[in-house]
Amino acid sequence: MAHARISAKLPPNIDPTKAPIAFGARALPKLNEELQSPELLTRQRALMALCDLVHDPENVYQAIKLGFLDNLKYLLLDQDSTVREKTTEVLYIMATHNVGRDGFIENGVIPALSQLLNDPVDICRRNMHRAFEIMAELPAGAVGIVESSLISSLVLKLKTELDEIQELILDTLCGCLCVEAFEALATGAVPILKEKLTHPSVAIRSKAARALLGISIPLEGKNIVWDEEVIPVLVSLLEDSDSEVRANAAGALMNATITTQGKYAALSADAIPPLLKLVDDETSKVRLNAIKALTMLSEAPEGRKTLLNHVDLFRGQLNDSSEAVSRAAKIAIKVIEWKP
């Protein structure tokens, strides 16, 4: 099926020639001056040259020291779409370096970038979300996004954004939900994520299941996942053709079935047979999450009664190549065979 692509191709009337780079230590200061030029073409050329330079972390360090971030934050609101596009690209590349991420947090770049959430140009929004995705991979960056009160906006954008950008938003949310899930829950994230579980895109299904795994860590999340009847949908994903979807669905079930109502919702959805099939899945992450989910279900008398007939399956994983899987299998056997 054909998908819309966000093009990075510049308009034909824009001169693609980069600004001449000054020699040695003068290079970055000169570009910093050109970023503030009233001439549109000068700003565009300076940004295009800067896109190349910021691939080097040493240049990123020097650029932050010279105050580039303040000028780049100002250019995010430039009337010219090409300036905004290249500014977001520079910031996205800078975010790939540790020194760049530190600079973002110290200089308030995250809230400045968020001003482009509704930008009419797709690639500007994509670059912004790529920067957010990278920031959310680290605890400090995820905290920065949460403290900028962006979680509600990101959740709601899942309803309207392009599929490619939805993937980035889901990745960002996965990082942030480990820090703070309550804002997302209050925004109605669970029903939105539930809808994404049946999306035609494998990546979106997988990332939505992973986000549900994170959002169901607090008790409030577990309760809402049960209340919104997400558990039967997660059970259906256990037979998905993609291993990452299966792993994340099993992981989300593992968290959701910690509560008694979650256990019985999974048992009612007949979760045990598909989970048993995953115990010897070729992917270790799938095996691990399936065993942990079954361990949760074995805490219910009905689940234990069924799983007592399959203890040998778990014993077969005691010598698994993954230490985590073998340890989970050992715990599962102990729980299943427990007697009061």
Image (cartoon, rainbow, N blue to C red):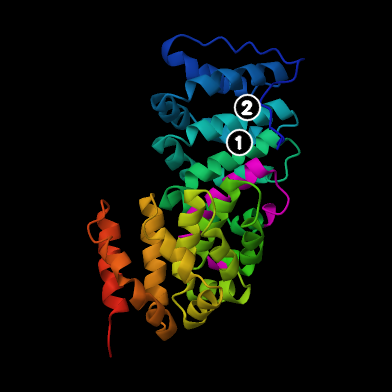
Q: Secondary structure at mark 1?
A: helix
Identify whether 34 is placed above or below 63: above
What percent of the width, then of the height, locates residue 130? 56, 39
Question: Residue 166 colored magenta?
Answer: yes
Q: Nearer the viewer, mark 1 or mark 2?
A: 1
The answer to whether residue 107 is seen in the rendering is no
What percent of the width, then of the height, locates residue 274? 48, 64
What percent of the width, then of the height, locates residue 290? 41, 63
Q: Earlier in the sequence, mark 1 or mark 2?
A: 2
Q: Quadrant of residue 299?
A: bottom left
Q: Secondary structure at mark 2?
A: helix
Label 1 belongs to which residue? 127
The answer to which of 251 and 101 lies nearer the viewer is 251
Q: Write down the region rendered in magenta.
A: 156-182
Q: Tell me which residue sits at (62%, 72%) in the image.
A: 229
Q: Is residue 301 left or right of residue 320?
A: right
Q: Tell me which residue sits at (41%, 78%) in the image.
A: 306
Identify whether 173 is placed above or below 38: below
| Main secondary structure of the magenta stretch | helix
Q: The residue under label 1 is which amino acid type?
A: Asn
In the rendered image, the residue lying farthest to the bottom is 340
The answer to which of 69 and 335 lies nearer the viewer is 335
Q: Is residue 192 left or right of residue 336?
A: right
